[in-house]
Image (cartoon, grey):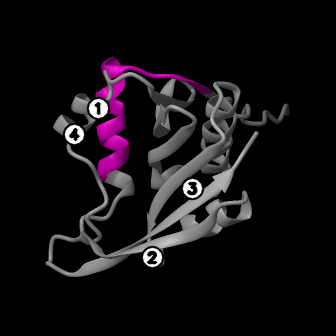
Amino acid sequence: MMVTRPRPSLLNIRSGSAADLEGVMRIMDRAFDPEFGEAWTRSQCLGIMPMTGVTLLLAEEDGGPVGFALHRLVADEAELLLLAVDPTFHRRGIGSRLLQQFIVAPTRAGASRLHLEVRENNPAAIMYRATGFEIVGRRRNYYTGRSGGSRDALTLSRTVG
């Protein structure tokens, strides 16, 4: 009897566009708990995507979206606006790969400083800190969830180049 092994899935990260918004919104709905108030609406995404310097990165596995990162470059500074991975694909390094792409692409385009914001106690903060981001500020009661509870946002930054 011949034993077959499942073939490994291939992760592909590519530039996305408004045409990918359905997949992005599905991931966002699954990845961001409404209790924390972090997710963006469809209209917020559509409003920012056509702006100069905004980039959507889409992580796909077996042809389907499993994660994304949205960032913008203004002058010599870049900001990570959103990063999310479908929870069924957590712990596979997808978030780290998207973060690395966020670090590399703006740096190649001339960025000298990178910024991001994360909810206090969000486990992703560990990943950000491990890649050289440092806490530079705090926005009190920045995130408001569906139950009305609020949480602070941590502002992180890192020099590149």
Range covered by the magenta-colored residues: 13-29
Q: Label 3: which residue? A: 90
Q: Residues within 10 Å of mark 3 (few under 14, many from 20)?
A: some
First-in-chain label (3 vs 1)? 1
Q: Nearer the viewer, residue 134 or 31?
A: 134
Q: Nearer the viewer, residue 127 or 139?
A: 139
Q: Label 2: which residue? A: 120
Q: Label 4: which residue? A: 44
Contact between labelled residues 4 and 1, with CB atoms less than 8 Å apart: yes
In the rendering, at what x and y percent does residue 3 appear?
82, 36
* Kind of residue indicated by mark 4: Gln
Q: Which mark is residue 127?
A: none
* Kind of residue indicated by mark 3: His
Q: The residue tagged with tag 1: helix, strand or loop? A: helix
**Which residue is at 37% across, 44% downward?**
27
Relative horizontal placement of residue 60, taking residue 22 as reference (left or right): right
Q: Residues within 10 Å of mark 4 (few under 14, many from 20)?
A: few
Q: CA distance from mark 2 to mark 3?
A: 20 Å
Instruction: Answer with the quarter of the image where residue 151 lies.
Output: bottom left
Q: Label 1: which residue? A: 48
First-in-chain label (3 vs 4)? 4
First-in-chain label (2 vs 4)? 4
Q: Is residue 20 magenta?
A: yes
